[in-house]
Amino acid sequence: MTLKQMLQSNSWLSIASVFRELYPEEGRNMEGYENVFDQLVTMSSEETDMEILIKTVKDDFDSSEYVDVSGKYLYPKSEEEEFARALEFTAWSKWLAMNISPQSLKSFSELEILAHCLHEMTFAGFEEVDIQQQLDSINKTVEEYKVMSEEEKQENITSIDELLLKLKEDDEENNA
């Protein structure tokens, strides 16, 4: 079953109910999610050779669990394509053509799958133009990094340990 077929066979109200349970912190954005849902059910799909893979993952850093939504090539053309891919910057028309992986269908209900997909699709915004602008900004930063001298690169990078420490401090500050 494709994501589009699944969207078209479920109502927004049913999805919204499960979405609120899975992502209670997103309550203030429900209108945005509903608008995206309304766009998706009428949007045309664009063929792709990927499927949607949804699984529960244990975080190595703090042992918490989260749901990961990614794409997997059905017919990988290289070793790199054999690994799951982030989908948050993928065109929504391509998401719609993707089948849901059999293991995802076994592990999650249709409404959970739709809620997780909507959350991932809108990770970078509720409008595709905003998502494309963020992707363009990331690509620009990568290109700028590539032309930096080694000294400039050292001044502009952060180790993973430093990043994780900063994120932890920010999280503690926000929860205080």
Image (cartoon, rainbow, N blue to C red):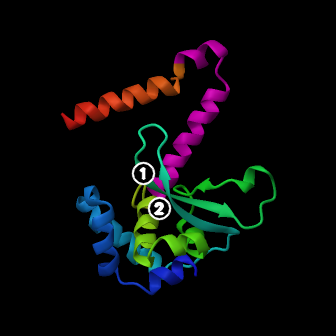
Instruction: In this rendered view, identify the residue nearer to me: 80 or 129.
Output: 80
Q: Nearer the viewer, mark 1 or mark 2?
A: 1
Q: Residue at x 28, y 66 (%)?
A: 21
Q: Residues within 10 Å of mark 2 (few under 14, many from 20)?
A: many
Residue that extends furthest to the front in the rendered view of this protein: 63
Residue 86 rendering spot, x and y as whole percentages: 57, 53
- Assess whether residue 154 is covered by the magenta stretch: yes
The image quadrant that residue 9 belongs to is: bottom left
Percent x, y for residue 176? 18, 33
Residue 121, disc: 2
Q: Is there CB contact under 8 Å for labels 1 and 2?
A: no
Check disc 1: other Cα within 10 Å, few if <14, some if 14-19, many if 20+: few
Q: Which residue corresponds to the image point at 43% horizontal and 75% vertical from the top-left?
A: 39
- Image quarter of the N terminus: bottom right
Q: Is residue 19 above or below residue 69?
A: below
The image position of residue 11, as x and y in percent, is 36, 84
Spatial separation of the CA atoms under disc 1 and disc 2 = 20 Å
Viewed as shown, does residue 173 lie left or right of 18?
Answer: left
Look at the numbered disc 2 and give the secondary structure of its residue: helix
* Residue for badge 1: 65
Provide the residue span drawn in magenta.
128-155
Q: Is residue 100 visible?
A: no
Quick check: 86 above or below 152? below
| Relative horizontal placement of residue 84, taking residue 157 as reference (left or right) | right
Instruction: Single out the residue that lies furthest toward the left.
Output: 176
- Quadrant in which residue 67 is drawn: bottom left
